[in-house]
Amino acid sequence: MVGGEFDLEMNFIIQDAESIACMVELLEHCDVTCQAEIWSMFTAILRKSVRNLQTSTEVGLIQQVLQKMSSVDDMIA
């Protein structure tokens, strides 16, 4: 997603926007704890950069998340 080894301090800018949709789809196959951990880290990545927020908006992350909201565990929702 970030074009190399991820580091929340040094390498956190999303380079591959299509990987966001892949991440959302992949999460459907993870257990709830794993999903919560990934969403927590992804939220931190988004908060670190307006550019990441813009990229997520451009690929329709909000729409993807809203479509999945009714079928996920309450902890994730």
Image: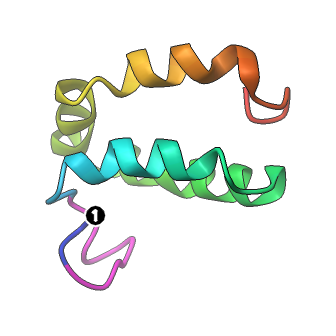
Mark 1 = which residue?
1
**Scheme of image coloration:** rainbow
Residue positioned 36% across, 78% down in the render: 7
Tell whether 22 sits left or right of 65.
Answer: left
Q: Quadrant of residue 41?
A: bottom right
Based on the picture, tell me whether residue 51 belongs to the magenta stretch: no
Magenta part of the protein: which range?
4-13
Based on the picture, tell me whether residue 11 belongs to the magenta stretch: yes
Could you tell me residue 26's position as x and y percent?
A: 54, 52
Could you tell me residue 66's position as x and y percent?
A: 53, 14
Tell whether 49 sits left or right of 9.
Answer: left
**Local SS, label 1:** loop
Locate the N terminus and report the quarter of the image it occupies: bottom left
Residue positioned 39% across, 54% down in the render: 45
The majority secondary structure of the magenta stretch comes to loop
Label 1 amino acid? Met
Q: Is residue 52 above or below residue 45?
A: above
Could you tell me residue 72's position as x and y percent?
A: 75, 29
Tell whether 29 sits left or right of 21.
Answer: right
